[in-house]
Amino acid sequence: MVVEDERDIARMVEYNLKKEGYRPVLVHDGFYAALTAAKEKPALILLDLMLPGLDGLEVCRRLKADQKTAHIPIIMLTAKGEESDKVLGLGLGADDYVTKPFSLKELLARVQAVLRRASRAEPAPEKLIAGEIELDAAKVEVKLKGAPLELTSKEFELLKALMAAGDRVLTREELLEKAWEMDSSLELETRTVDVHVGTLRRKLKKEGRRIITVKNYGYRFEAGR
Ligand code: CA
């Protein structure tokens, strides 16, 4: 979710997030930010501090005070000279900040880093269910249409990571980290992920369509429908 009253900036950020495979929701007013966050449950909030309605710090305070939204990571967008706001914001529980004018590359890198930290902190639920797929993390077991499905350990870890991520797109690097438990800078190539996703899709038969390729980025799991 992008909370930004300057429409040009909001649109530019939206465009670039979409290009990276995210699905941003725009809010232009501080007052609607908390309401929209509770409704949409975004994976991350980019929050401008100078906003009409409620200012960003107050929005941050409300988001962190509400159980429904307290866990959502926040990156503040601050203007130069708002040093004290930045400190206040971090004190209120914001995860990071980017100073305007920011480069999109920097913003996207921060987004990815904060999302990665957030997904590490969240324990995956033990049972993940989507359509005819049933994954039991504790038993390390997957059932398809109620029948046990034979997966390799990598296929299992990939499926678990994708299902646990909800709607979020996972990059190949993130999937490597999760399924192989190693840093993607090591020799294993990200192409390896594609190969295993390919075999996983085939084994899931019709349900394999739930694993969506996000071009130039990674994969996303479609739990609905
Ligand atoms: Ca503003």
Image (tube, helix red, strand yellow):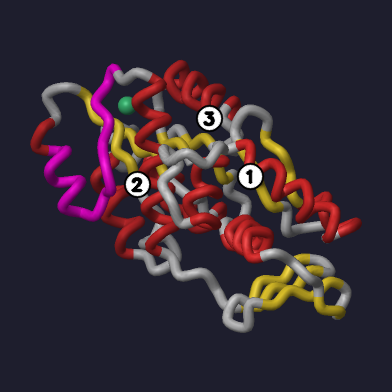
The range drawn in magenta is: 85-101
Residue type, label 1: Val
| In magenta segment, residue 159 | no
* Disc 1 to disc 3: CB gap under 8 Å: no
**85 lies left or right of 76:** left
Q: Quadrant of residue 63?
A: bottom left
Give how far across and how far down residue 14 sits, in percent: 53, 27
**Residue that label 3 marks:** 17
Residue type, label 2: Ile
The quadrant of the rendering that contains the C terminus is bottom right
Residue type, label 3: Leu
Q: Secondary structure at mark 2?
A: strand
Residue at left offset 42%, top offset 52%: 34
Residue situated in front as seen by the camera: 57 or 154: 154
Using the numbered discs, state the Cα–Cα distance from disc 1 to disc 3 in whole angstroms: 23 Å
**Residue that label 1 marks:** 193
* 5, above or below 197, in the image: above
Using the numbered discs, state the Cα–Cα distance from disc 2 to disc 3 in whole angstroms: 15 Å
**Residue that label 2 marks:** 74
Give how far across and how far down residue 55 sits, in percent: 28, 40
